[in-house]
Image (cartoon, rainbow, N blue to C red):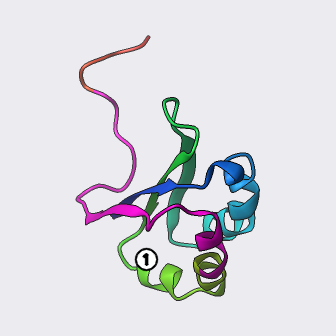
């Protein structure tokens, strides 16, 4: 799968509106046939920092970046950002989440 983590630093006046701004992009991406997950988190240390963790089946990432909702998001999101997002994008040998080996909950 292709595993992607993107860090977004938003302008302080957009922190409360970021999830609303990205809602249609998030919902459309989650409906893509090759999307495995697309989850947002907000930093507990910096309320202006959001992290997107997403994964796609290997053959689905290209169609994602060519979609109309991706293009729309790339056009609307910059207005709310302080800087260009930081990204880690890697093809990994997995097909989903595994269990943490260092801890077992029964």
What span is colored magenta in the figure?
A: 75-100
Secondary structure type for disc 1: helix
Percent across and percent down for residue 75 are 63, 82
The question of residue 78 being in magenta is answered with yes
* Category of crowding for the residue at label 1, using alpha-carbon neighbours closer than 10 angstroms: few (below 14), some (14–19), many (at least 20): some
Q: Residue at x 23, y 58 (%)?
A: 93
Q: Which residue is mark 1?
A: 61
* Numbered marks: total: 1
In the rendered image of this protein, does residue 17 appear above or below residue 74? above
Residue furthest to the top in view is: 106
Q: Residue at x 73, y 62 (%)?
A: 21
Percent across and percent down for residue 18 are 68, 55
Q: Nearer the viewer, residue 56 or 67?
A: 67
Percent across and percent down for residue 55 are 43, 60
Q: Quadrant of the C terminus?
A: top left
Q: Quadrant of the N terminus?
A: bottom left
Quarter of the image for residue 70 reads: bottom right
Looking at the image, residue 42 sits to the left or right of residue 20; the answer is left
Looking at the image, residue 71 sits to the left or right of residue 57; the answer is right
Quarter of the image for residue 98 reads: top left
Looking at the image, residue 65 sits to the left or right of residue 67; the answer is left
Quarter of the image for residue 27 reads: bottom right
Percent across and percent down for residue 87 are 35, 62
Q: Nearer the viewer, residue 33 or 5?
A: 5
The question of residue 61 being in magenta is answered with no
- Would you say residue 27 is visible in this rendering? yes
Q: Residue at x 31, y 17 (%)?
A: 103
- Would you say residue 31 is visible in this rendering? no
In the rendered image of this protein, does residue 38 appear above or below residue 79? above
């Amino acid at each position: 799968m292709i595993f992607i983590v993107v860090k977004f630093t938003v302008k302080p006046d957009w922190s409360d509106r970021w999830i609303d701004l990205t809602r249609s992009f998030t919902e459309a991406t989650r409906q893509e046939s090759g999307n495995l997950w697309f989850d947002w988190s907000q930093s507990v240390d910096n309320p202006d920092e959001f992290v997107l963790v997403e994964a796609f089946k290997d053959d689905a990432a290209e169609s994602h970046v060519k979609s109309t909702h991706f293009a729309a998001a790339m056009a609307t999101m910059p207005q709310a950002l302080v800087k260009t997002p930081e990204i880690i994008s890697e093809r990994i040998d997995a097909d989903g989440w595994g269990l943490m080996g260092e801890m077992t909950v029964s």
